[in-house]
Amino acid sequence: MKIQVLGTGCPRCKALASNAEKAVRELGLNAEIEKVTGIQEILKFEILMTPGLVIDGKVRAAGRVPSPDEIKQLLVESKESR
């Protein structure tokens, strides 16, 4: 499973990365978490606001910081839809 956190390094982006790491740890998943900080790379995902959360190539949240519990739910849903 690949998780990407889209953002230039603002406090909200860092909070999202932290929440994603916590969710992965609590679920015991083997997942790669990548921080995408380049503007050109972020634009490829066609989001209007950062931070963004991408799971296995699909944008699952943008412009807000989901809680660890919400991220866990998104991760479970993504895993089930494989």
Image (spheres, helix red, strand yellow):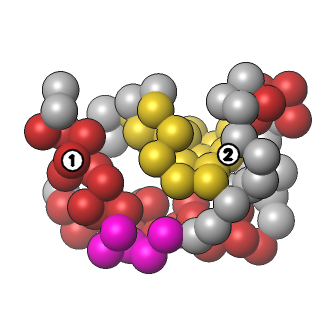
Q: Main secondary structure of the magenta part?
A: helix
Position of residue 10 in the picture relative to residue 56 (left or right): right
The tag on residue 77 is: 1
- Name which residue type carries label 1: Glu
Residue 69 is a magenta residue: yes
- Disc 1 crowd rating (10 Å Cα; few below 14, some 14-19, many 20+) is few
Instruction: Name the residue at 28% across, 62% down.
Output: 72
Counting from the top left corner in percent of width and height, residue 74 is at: 31, 54
- Quarter of the picture holding the N terminus: top left
Q: Is residue 67 magenta?
A: yes
Measure how far apart labels 1 and 2 are at the Cα level. 20 Å
Task: State the image coordinates of residue 47 (x, y, percent, origin top left).
Answer: 71, 41
Q: Is residue 25 left or right of residue 12?
A: left
Q: Is residue 75 left or right of residue 22?
A: left
How many other residues sit within 10 Å of disc 2, few (<14), some (14-19) or many (≥20)? many
State the residue in front, 54 or 26.
54
Please indicate, yes or no, whether residue 65 appears anywhere in the rendered image. Answer: yes
What is the span of residues highlighted in magenta in the rendered image? Answer: 66-70
x then y, percent, for residue 31: 32, 41
Q: Residue at x 44, y 75 (%)?
A: 67
Q: Secondary structure at mark 1?
A: helix
- Residue 6 is marked as 2
Q: Secondary structure at mark 2?
A: strand
Q: Which mark is residue 8?
A: none
Residue drawn at (73%, 24%), measured in percent from left and top?
44
**Image-quadrant location for residue 81:** top left
Give the mark nearest the N terminus, 1 or 2. Answer: 2
Q: Which residue is pictured at 66% across the width and 30% down the height?
A: 45
